[in-house]
Amino acid sequence: MQTRRIAMKLPNLQKTHLQGKVLQLLLLTFSFFIITSANAQTLNCKSDFSFDVDHDNLEVQLVARSSHYPAAFSWEISDGSSLRGQRTKHSFSSPGEYKVCLTVIAFDSVSNQRCTTRVCKAVEIVNCDRLKAEFDLVQDGMSIAVRGTSNSSNVVYGFSFGDGEHARGQAAKHRYDQRGVYTVCFYAKDTIYGCKTEVCKRVLIDPCSLRAKFDYRQDGNAFKFYAKANDSNVRYVWDFGDGNIGTGDEVGHRYQKPGVYAVCLTVYSKTGTVICDFKTCERVVVEDNDCDLEAKFEFRQDGNDFKFVAKANASPARFVWDFGDGITGYGDEIKHSYDKPGVYEVCLTVYASNTNTNKVCRTKICKRVKIEDENKGCDLRADFDVRIDGKNILVQAKSNQDSVLYFWSFGDMQDGTGIKTKHEYDGYGKYEICLIVFNPRTKCKTCVCKTILIERPCDLKADFKYATYSNKVYFKARSNGSDKSRYYWDYGDGSYGEGEKTRHKYSQRGVYEVTLTVYDPRTECKTSITYKVRIGLQKSVAEETPTKNTDVKGAVSWRANVSPSPARTTVAISSDDKKLSSVKIYAMDGSLALEQQGDLRQIDISKLTKGMYYAHVFADDGTLTIVKFLKE
């Protein structure tokens, strides 16, 4: 019995030994877990990335860094794109502000552990299409002079001349070695964002810049030809089109038969070792004068006033006059006055019928008349400035001579005198102001006229609210204008709308400048306001306030002047109150017609269509005033 009891306990001893082994294994595993956890907690992983933006191509280069390797790199961009790799690049569909996030999963070979880090940065893609450039080119034989401008002050300039040569700077001169057609290019590169724009022109390089033209007087079938060239040392050769030739800058020729003849003038000159030539042709008509019609005329001159008397050897006859200044007349006796000094060619054409052949005969006679400049030698010049305040104006004259008298005509049957004077108009509208300056000592005088616009005062205000739903935006405008007010929208993506309430769907995410323009036809007042609208991006507090809120004639703290007005080719913008920085010129429909920064003393408006424009003038301190002017 005792022996069996011992045998029955042996299995319990084996079981106890097995439980001890299991416990020891668990203790080792727990110790390893503690050590591993301690190593994982002390592992310090870091990551970062740098980027280089190519704004011209809407592209960004991304380079990642990690404190531990090997590592896996993945990228997330706020336009919905995902990328992989330590070095990669991405192209954006449009300019804007984007969020780029890098996730790095790295492995530590010492601790045999893995760590994950994430870092995000904002990347701005600038619209490089806003950078504009232009240049002027002046050619002189084999040489050219170029000067460029741009709408940005933070740029560097350069030229390429099409023959492998280049130059840096805003202006340059270049001489070509060979004749030919070259493409001259001017580039402007933004030093902040790296944007670059380029404009090119073709130029013909030819040392032979010889040019010539000719005129003629006709008396029936007899002609007198007059030639003129842009070089004094030339030879003139004529081909009269009937087999005869002539030489000289003035030559006469009589045709033997009626018909149409091509008269050609060829001029020759020598430039160095190169012989240059230039040819020009013109058709002349010799009438079939079966009735031997002859005519002549005489004239009497009194300053710029003329009396012309014509005679013909046929009766009845019809006399038609061309006075050479765009005016025509009829009759054998006629008077005419010229507006400006100069040389004019007066032509008389006489028509008469041949009763034997039943034909209408014609003959033409031309003579030159000269109108002397009464002020020649006077060198008297004058100009004046106008300041408008409601219906009141202040005019101030200036002249290049002393001891002169100033006389004013204000265009409303009222006049005044003095170098500086004030005037008040009774009504609104356009008025032509003329200044006459007279020097009593030399008897010289000159006249300068300008047209001004006296406008009704405006107090039109406008604002709008909007609500965004994904890429759709609903707009609602309000103003203090009449019920006839019109509402025009510029959505900032090249699309436009109209109406007090409107909606628009954007095709891409980004920041858009939405402009509301309100026009009241009853008061002819106009105002505009602009907000920045973000589509698919988080909105900042600053964008809740308008970037522009201007009315055409609302109260402003300073004034600017546009002269002349009306204007044809250029205008100058100035201010006695502020130092000016830039101007944006808008058409009546609210569209941006022209923009210029820096010097506003000469703004080219020759390409603008005729009509009224609003100049939004900006000062260096960021304030704005608006001036209205007329383009003729």
Image (cartoon, helix red, strand yellow):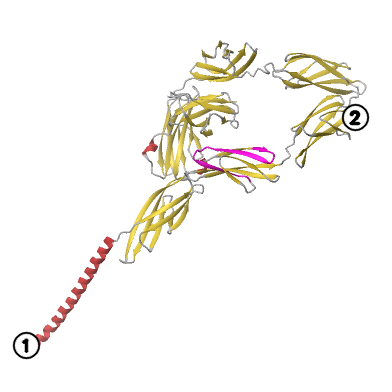
Work out how far the residue at label 2 is from the one at label 1, CA to CA, in angstroms. 167 Å
Depth check, front residue: 98 or 290: 98
Which mark identifies residue 457? none
Give the amino acid type for the residue marked by disc 1 in the picture: Gln
**Nearer the observer, 604 or 5:** 604
The residue at which mark 2 appears reads as 257
Q: Amino acid at mark 2?
A: Lys
Mark 2, secondary structure of its residue: loop
Tell me which residue sits at (43%, 26%) in the image: 461
Up-down: is 552 above or below 302?
below
Q: In which quadrant will I find the N terminus?
A: bottom left
Q: Quadrant of the C terminus?
A: top right
* Residue 492 x, y percent position in the rendering: 48, 38
By secondary structure, the bulk of the magenta-drawn segment is best described as strand
Tell me the quarter of the picture where residue 67 sits. bottom left
Mark 2 vs 1, N-terminal side: 1
Magenta residue span? 138-161
Q: Is residue 270 magenta?
A: no
Q: Nearer the viewer, mark 2 or mark 1?
A: 2
Asked where in the image residue 410 lies, by quadrant, the reply is top right
Q: Residue drawn 22% across and 69% down? A: 31
Crowdedness near tag 2: few (<14), some (14–19) or many (≥20) residues, C-alpha within 10 Å: few
Residue drawn at point x = 35 percent, y = 61 percent: 68
